[in-house]
Amino acid sequence: MDLQDIFLLFGRYLNWLGLGLSVLLLLPLVTLILPDLVHKPSRGLSEFIDRLTGIALEISIFAAMFLVLIQLTAVLASYAMGLSFTWLSELVIYGFATLFMFGSAVALRNSAHVRVDIFRPRFGETGRNWIELTGIYLFLFPIMIRILQTGEQGLTRAWTIFEGSRETDGLPILFLFKTLLPIFAILMIVQGLSEALKAALRLTGHLEPQTPQSEGAGHGA
C-alpha cells in the first residue's frame, strides 16, 4: 500500500464518520417536533459546540498577532533593506487565511456576519428565528458540504506528495494551507448546527429570546 492509498483510506474513513455524524444535523428539526423530549441534550450540544468554537477564537487571535508581526517584518525588510523573500510573503498569506478560516465560525457564533439589516429588524423574534433556521438549512449546510466534496481529491493529492510552494524559496507546507478549506467548512457546519439548535430552542420556548440589541454582542471564549 503506497502513500496515496493510505490517504485515500483515511479519507474514506473520515467520509464514513462524517456521514454518521450528519444525522446530528436533523436534531434542530427534531427539537421543533419533540421539544420537551430533546431540549436538554440540544441545549447541551449547542453549549458544547460554542465552547469548542472558543478554541477557534484563540487560534484566530494568535493568527492575527502572527500576521501583524510577519507583515511588519516583510515591510521593514523590503523598504528598509531592499530585501524580498517569497517565504515571508507566503507566511503573510497563510496567516491571513488561518485568521479568516478559523474566525468565520467565531463570527457566526457571535452574530457578526453581515445580514440584511434593512429587513431583519422588521421581523419579530419568531420571524428572525425561522429565517435563521431556514437560511442555515437552505444555504449554509449545502454550501459547506459542497466545499467538502469538491476539495477531497485535490487535498488527497496535496497530502500524498506533501505539496509545497512552486517557488524555489517558498515554504514546503502548501498541503497544510489547502487543509484550511475543509477545516473552515467543518467549523461552519458545526457552528451552524449550534445556531440552528438555538433558533429551534427559542421557537419552542426553551431558550431566552435574543433581542436585536444583544445580537452581535459576542460570547466569551
Image (cartoon, rainbow, N blue to C red):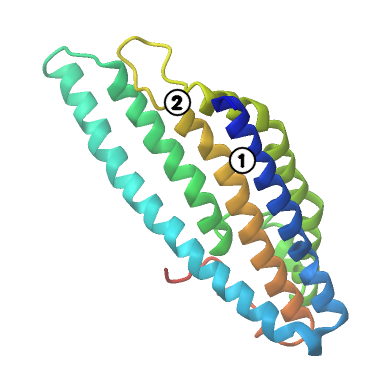
x, y percentage for residue 150? 71, 32
Q: What is the distance, in whole Å, between disc 2 and disc 1 at their CAs?
A: 20 Å
Q: Is residue 114 visible?
A: no
Residue farthest to the right, as pictured: 33
Of 11 and 51, nearer the camera is: 11
Of 140 and 41, nearer the camera is: 41
x, y percentage for residue 47? 57, 75
Q: Quadrant of the N terminus?
A: top right
The residue indicated by pointer 2 is: 174
x, y percentage for residue 26? 80, 65
- Residue 151's label in the rendered image is none
Q: Quadrant of residue 131?
A: bottom right
Q: Nearer the viewer, mark 2 or mark 1?
A: 1
Give the crowd class for mark 1: few <14, some 14-19, many >=20 residues within 10 Å.
few
Q: Residue at (45%, 33%) from the top-left corner?
A: 176
The residue indicated by pointer 1 is: 10
Q: Residue at (70%, 52%) from the top-left corner?
A: 18
Kind of residue indicated by mark 1: Phe
Q: Residue at (68%, 74%) from the top-left corner?
A: 198
Q: Quadrant of residue 166?
A: top left
Q: Quadrant of the C terminus?
A: bottom left
Kind of residue indicated by mark 2: Leu
Q: How many marks?
A: 2
